[in-house]
Image: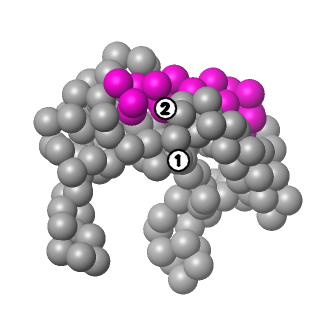
Amino acid sequence: MSIDRLLKAQKQENQEIVNAILDDGSKPNAEYTIEHHFSSSSFDRLEKAAVDAFKAGFEVNDAEEMELEDGSVIYCFDAIAHHKLDVEMLDKACEALLVLAAKQKVDYDGWGTYFIDENGEEYIDDEEFEEKPHH
């Protein structure tokens, strides 16, 4: 799929995610931790993508190894930003990160964040979210 088609789909998803989080009652003006997900079967490619994301101003966490259901292994990391749930900002970040992923031949797997309550605290419901970002 072309970057233009991927970006169009991602922009629609960005709007849907933001609407869902805010409709659930998450604090609209809070600063959110936005985790953009990357994966690849090639550690070297993933490492180059992580360096590019860092140079683009994102925090980058250490790569993790994951075994898939078929027994194959992939590597993944998150490029992290902190800002309001602003669709325009998310669209721009996603466009830059989709281009970065295509350049390094890795997968951009979208983004996630956490619910923020009226006190400004990130809320993780262990049973519902299992400490994973809200998608």
Write the residue at 61% across / 59% down.
135
Measured as percent of width and height from the top left, residue 2 is found at 53, 34
| Camera-nearest residue between 122 and 42 | 42
Q: Is residue 57 above or below residue 18?
A: above
Measured as percent of width and height from the top left, residue 11 is found at 70, 39
Which structural element holds mark 1? Answer: strand
Which structural element holds mark 2? Answer: helix
Q: Is residue 92 magenta?
A: yes
Write the residue at 31% across / 34% down.
105
Residue segment shown in magenta = 85-103
Q: Is residue 76 left or right of residue 135?
A: left
Measured as percent of width and height from the top left, residue 84 is found at 70, 35
Q: Which mark is residue 98?
A: 2
Q: Main secondary structure of the magenta part?
A: helix
| Camera-nearest residue between 11 and 58 | 11
Write down the residue under mark 1. Answer: 110
Q: Is the residue marked by circle 2 packed among few (<14), some (14-19), or many (20+) residues within 10 Å?
A: many
Q: Is residue 134 magenta?
A: no
Q: Is residue 12 above or below residue 2?
A: below
Amino acid type of disc 1? Gly
Q: Is residue 116 above or below residue 107?
A: below
Q: Residue furthest bottom?
A: 127
Amino acid type of disc 2? Leu
Measured as percent of width and height from the top left, residue 69 is found at 28, 77
